[in-house]
Amino acid sequence: MLTGLSNRQGQHGQAALFMTMTLTLSFGLVGLVVDLGWAYWRQEACLEAAQSAAMGGVMFAIKNNTTWPPATCNSSSAIICQATATACPTNLTPGQTQTTDVQSACVYAQSNGFMATGKQNVTIAANTGNPPTAGGVSTAYYITARVSEQVPLTFLAVIAGRTSSTVAAVATAGVISSPAGDCVYVLDPSGAAALNASNGVTVQSECGFWINSNNSTNALSVTGGSALTALDSTTIDVVGVSSNANGGTITPSPTRSSAAADPFASRNVPYQPSATAGHPYACSYGANGCTHTSTATLACDHGTVGGPAFTQSTWVASLTMNPGVYCGGISLGNVGAVTFNPGVYILNGGGMNLGGSGGISGGVSGTNVGFFDTGTNASYVGITIANGVNPTFSANTSGSMAGLLFYQDPSLHPTISSTTTSYFAGGSSLILAGSLYFVNTPINFSNGTSSSTSSVGMVVYDVTFTGGAYFKHDGTNITSLGGTTTAGMVQ
């Protein structure tokens, strides 16, 4: 019995030894929970700050660079190119106006709690072309933000042998530019001579043509010595068969293609009697510009529903028109000159006729204007700009009518006739900046009309050219058919 007691006494202190041996492991396990959890949370904060900085800087660049591509990078530019990552300055203040996109990026990081000072660092790289952090991604311009922070180690310090560790995140945002579309879209799915050029006219486009007609004989028709040309390596895409006869030429040879989608299919319209798929109703044009009565009809600023057009046929030297709802449309003639003030003109039945009753000798002008031609299938009338009027119009640059100079209500399907066809004559100086959208009715360009000094787009059912026309894009994309520029995260 005494021997057994002596053996048990020899085991004293084993529990303390065991605790001592496992203490390091215990600190390590606690460190995994505490230190790694804290480090993970701070790394997420770094990522949020980096993404905010990159996107904020790119948005600043888009706002302050007028055309894309390219970016304008020089010492005096608001757009900075620095391929080498550079630490943010520490003297920037959120809320103050920044002068460069890099400063803006740094302020966004600062607003998220990170600066290039102390245990934190924020660097910005920016340049044109492909960002090194996102292989295979092409951008017109990019900004890469790197954010890092030293975080303290507590329990893990026992294992790591140091008191801090570094967490970091990187994010890249870029300016993505899509290529420009065509200038002329003809959407008639099967008609003969959906695009028709005749009588020796010259029609040229710097941005191509697309004809949806699948007609097996002459979806595109160029005759009588006329010439249809797509310039600058652009194309003429036709679903069906093209025809040129009697000296007509088509350059380059048309490409057989599938049908093009309506590029304005998702555009909001100012007013529609009923909703139409793809064209949601959007009414935001002034106190009286687009309101409804209790009977769900459009309130009229001028005239009455089903009544006569707003007419000026008694001689005046000048006439100023104001935006609003014109029930019965607009008919102007026997006038010296007409000025359309900026805004949206809603033609509720009756269309618009400029110069058809007495001429407009001094011309017609309007900047930042849009004409929305609506009504009912029975009351709809097209647009007529008579020979000799010589109009100068440019489209709105914002709102749902941005880029749309003349816009037919897409919910209407009127019977195609001489009154529902739109005629753009205007004489030798038809200067239009914007798009003509007549998705369910044809238009006619005639009598020497020209748009070589401006940018015109067409999205029409059918078009007939009996006078010259020239189509081009410009850097402002006034037609809304040009390339689009967007900002997005690329890494």
Image (cartoon, rainbow, N blue to C red):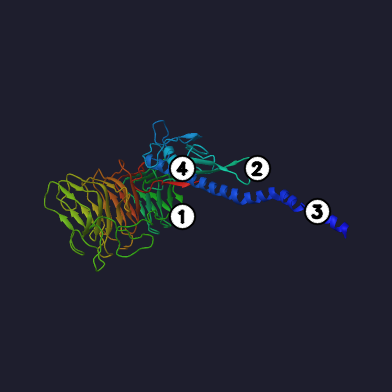
Q: Which residue is mark 1?
A: 258
- At numbered mark 4, what does the secondary structure look like: helix, strand or loop? helix
Mark with earlier residue (4, 2): 4
Q: Is residue 231 visible?
A: no
Mark with earlier residue (1, 3): 3
Residue 109 circle label: 4
Closest to the observer: 26 or 151? 26
| Residue type at tag 3 | Gln
Residue 353 placement, left or right of 127: left
Image coordinates of residue 144 in percent, x first then y, are 50, 40
- The CA distance from mark 3 to mark 4 is 61 Å
Image coordinates of residue 111 in percent, x first then y, are 43, 44
- The CA distance from mark 4 to mark 2 is 30 Å
Closest to the observer: 99 or 416? 99
Q: Which residue is mark 2?
A: 160
Observer-side mark, 4 or 2, equals 2
Observer-side mark, 4 or 1, equals 4
Image coordinates of residue 275 in percent, x first then y, are 34, 64
- The CA distance from mark 1 to mark 2 is 64 Å
